[in-house]
Amino acid sequence: MINRIILGVCLLTLSGTYAQQGTASPYSYFGTGEQKFKGTNEIKTMGSLAVFQDSIHINTLNPASYANLQKTTLAVGFSNTSAKIHTANATEKSNRSTFDYFALAFPAGKLGVSLGIMPYTFVGYNIANTIEENNQKIAREYNGEGGISRTYLGLGYKITPNFNIGAEFAYNFGDTNNRTTKFIADDGTGFLINRGSQQIISNDYSGFSFNTALSYSKVFSDQMKLDVAVTYSPQTTLKNKQTGTLSTVELSSTGNLNTIDQINIDAPKKDLIMPQKHSLGVGYGQNHKWFVGAEYTGVQNSKLNNFYTNEQNATFEDSHRFSLGGYYTPKHNSFEKYYHRWTYRFGLKYENTGLVLNDQSIKDTSVSLGFGLPIGVNRDSSNINIGLEYGKKGTKNHGLIQENYFNISVGFSFNDRWFQKRRYE
């Protein structure tokens, strides 16, 4: 079945991979934007655990897990995020729908192979404020759009029945556009000067990244299972072609901006550092029944200060994330009650994002629930995975912004046997 629908799914998902504005977060103004979770729906609803691994789901956080796959698996996911953005004095709402991932994986003896495409970061903000300079009120507006996507090829190999090793090679590409517009809203006598300036800085990123993983799994006689996983991504660099323009603009009576003149400006060449990242996770549970895992992830985001040195009141520090999650399946082989074969997932996440504004570290906390609905009569069947996540990012204090967000995600995981000669045709 999977090989009959793969072409249609490819065309549907890949057509929406590019040019989507996947965030409306003001925090996407900083760095390369808001990072998109690079895992599948079922992993996300378990707190983003790289340690989790089984034989029918793709875990793109842990390439060593590919060696455990027993069927060819196609995974595709979408999500919708609604958010309330709060300051001390105002509240705004936003809503975005995005394509999240397309991944294909298949077993080849002791080797597991996966390839796919997914967004890596999103830029999408619209910020307006007014400041006073020399007894004049200056109105400023900041707009940004774009992001970075990634394609990957991952390999997992079973060294022994208990140990797997894995590696992932990714190509990252994309562009961002950041626009700053300024007008004199009050020249000191109450008049608006309808001519102002607009600066546009465009970045075009491209380059490779690398991820490695080592995992250990031990199944005991009573079907209890212990999982341990370590991942490591070394620091890499993305090439950046940066261009810029400076324009004089005029505000029309209808509120539109008209460009009067424009010049190109020199933009310094700055290659972007992708900091090193590591994680350590441990999980325990009963095969096909339940699982609980915990994980720590650290990223050397302080290296980003070498790239973004002109942001006022903004710096970067090393970030960390603590995750807790798991699942429960009442009876995976039940023929009487369909909902007994559902998989119920949960997750908790606490993250220091590494962004520091006004001397305040920006935190992101969330809780998630998930439901895995099998399509077929056994646990190895294809499945639909529905996820719900509620979280909070930032704070209303210290002149900053707090985002309360709610995410609904839907993922499809299609499983079938490929490359296997049939006994009967």
Image (tube, rainbow, N blue to C red):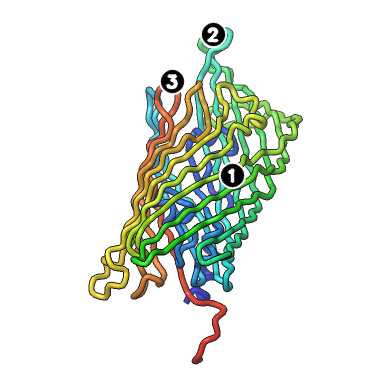
Residue carrying label 2: 188
Residue type at mark 3: give it: His
Q: Nearer the viewer, mark 1 or mark 2?
A: 1
Which of disc 3 and disc 1 is earlier in sequence?
1
- The Cα atoms of the two marked residues, 1 and 2, are separated by 40 Å
| Foreground residue among 246 and 415 | 415
Residue carrying label 1: 147
Residue carrying label 3: 398
Return the x and y of residue 143 as percentages of the image width and height. Answer: 56, 34
Element carrying mark 3: loop
Element carrying mark 1: strand
Element carrying mark 2: loop
| Foreground residue among 135 and 88 | 88
- The Cα atoms of the two marked residues, 2 and 3, are separated by 29 Å
| Foreground residue among 182 and 96 | 96
Tell me if mark 2 has few (under 14), some (14-19) or many (20+) residues whose alpha carbon lies within 10 angstroms of its own.
some
